[in-house]
Image (tube, rainbow, N blue to C red):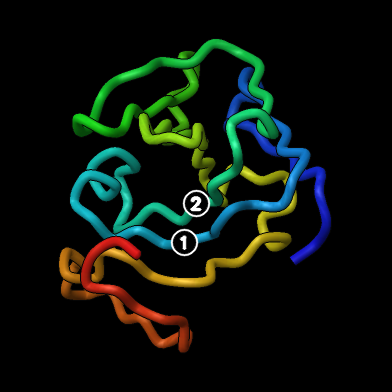
Amino acid sequence: MSAPPYDGGCLCGQVRWRATAEPVNVRVCHCRNCQRATGGPYFARAVFPAGDLQRTGELTRWPTSPRVDRRSCARCGTPMFSDPKDTPARLAVSLATLDAPGVLAPQVHIWVSEKLAWVRIDDGLPQFLQGA
């Protein structure tokens, strides 16, 4: 893992973000909400304190559960952020949107009880049936 800042953006470049602190956690979530929201088998994301992550560009916003809103680029549709409504305020950002996607690596897999059957987890990271 490298030191902050961490920068990223969407496919078309309209949305940009910068995190100026270390992430609170870096996880791979296999829950059905994350699968559907990203269109992929899981959501690999880093969570930052809300005050340490700045965003620019126009985003769409929609709730995927009573406690989480999702945001995507309004132009190209890249799934970018998960905005938990918990406190303290935090924001999750997709690892795939990092300009240098290898600078942050997941530390754990969560919600593996909802993992797609064809996904194999052989990276040696801890796994939790639900959240951790």
> Which dot marks residue 104?
none
Neighbours of disc 1 within 10 Å: few (<14), some (14-19), many (20+) = many
Res 80 seen here: no
Query: Residue 87, position in %: x, y?
Result: 43, 35
Looking at the image, is 115 positioned above or below residue 54? below
- Taking the spot 42% from the left edge, 31% from the top edge, the residue there is 83
The x and y percentages for residue 49 are 60, 38
Element type where label 1 sits in the image: strand
**N-term-proximal mark, 2 vs 1:** 1
Label 2 SS:
strand
In the rendered structure, the answer to whether residue 107 lies left or right of residue 65 reads: right
The residue under the point 54% across, 47% down is 47
Q: In this picture, is 101 found above or below 89?
A: below
Q: Which residue is mark 2?
A: 45
Q: For the residues labelled 2 and 1, say whether their Cβ atoms are less than 8 Å apart.
A: yes
Residue at 39 percent of width and 52 percent of height: 43
How many marks are shown on the rendered structure? 2
Q: Residues within 10 Å of mark 2 (few under 14, many from 20)?
A: many
Instruction: Give the Cα separation between the discs numbered 2 and 1.
Output: 6 Å
* 124 to the left or right of 36: right
Circle 1: residue type: Arg
In the picture of the structure, the residue carrying the numbered disc 1 is 27
Which percent across, then down, holds residue 92? 50, 41
Query: Residue 50: x percent and y percent?
Result: 59, 31
Q: Amino acid at mark 2?
A: Arg
Please tell me which residue lies in front, 105 or 87: 87
Q: Is residue 60 left or right of residue 94?
A: left
